[in-house]
Amino acid sequence: MKTEKLQQHLINDTTRLYCVLDGASVPNLPMRLFETGARNFCLFKGDLKPDMLYMAPYVIQLKPGDQMTEWVLGEGFGKHWGIFVHSRHKIAEMRRHFRSIVNAYDERGNSMTFRFYDPRVLSRFLPTCTPEELDAFFGNVDTFFAEAEDGENLLSFKVENGTFKRTELD
């Protein structure tokens, strides 16, 4: 999908645009965040060793015309770098919410990273959720967006009147 079309779908005047990018998929993500000055938070808590810092997921606020926005939309789409989110909430609230869902637990209570920020995971996970799970997962999020499997189109996920909606945008 061309950058202009992505901007039409993602940038509006009524909600904030965030992305959650995967440091394991995006080359030198922490350095790019530093260079662009983009507002961001790491989703992993505490002081991280350098290798984990580069592998961690980050929530980033994207604004029209910003260097980071142009780079993510122009270079990252179709490469499974992460997902996009519409929300009316501030980035600190989004960090809290995403940190609350980045860890999952197996049947023995062992913690593991839930890679919801991988578009391939998100698009398979959301349709399996119960209405209660969707409410908890969406939290402060109005709409989730992820690239389609073909890397060409954008998928939109939202809950309207208690009903899960998946729409392919082209």
Image: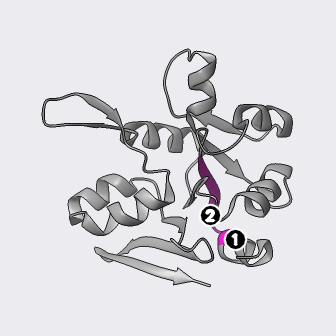
Colour logic: one colour
**The quadrant where residue 131 appears:** bottom left
* Residue 168 rendering spot, x and y as whole percentages: 51, 82
Q: Which mark is residue 12?
A: 1
Q: Which residue is at 32% across, 77% downward?
A: 161
Q: Is residue 67 left or right of residue 93?
A: right
The stretch drawn in magenta includes residue 120: no
Q: Which residue is at 80% across, 61% downward?
A: 64
Look at mark 2 in the image and give the residue it sits on. 15
- Residue 88 to residue 94: above or below: below
Q: Amino acid at mark 1?
A: Asn
Q: Secondary structure at mark 2?
A: loop
Q: Which residue is at 54% across, 66% downward?
A: 145
Q: Give the CA separation, mark 2 to mark 1.
A: 6 Å
Q: Residue furthest bottom?
A: 170
**The quadrant where residue 75 appears:** bottom right
**Magenta residues?**
10-21
Q: Amino acid at mark 2?
A: Thr
Q: Which residue is at 44% across, 71% downward?
A: 157
Q: Residues within 10 Å of mark 2 (few under 14, many from 20)?
A: some
* Residue 8 rendering spot, x and y as whole percentages: 72, 77
Q: Quadrant of the N terminus?
A: bottom right
Query: Marks 2 and 1: CB-CB under 8 Å?
Result: yes
* Residue 66 rendering spot, x and y as whole percentages: 84, 53
Which residue is at the front of the view, 65 or 33? 33
* Residue 136 rendering spot, x and y as whole percentages: 30, 52
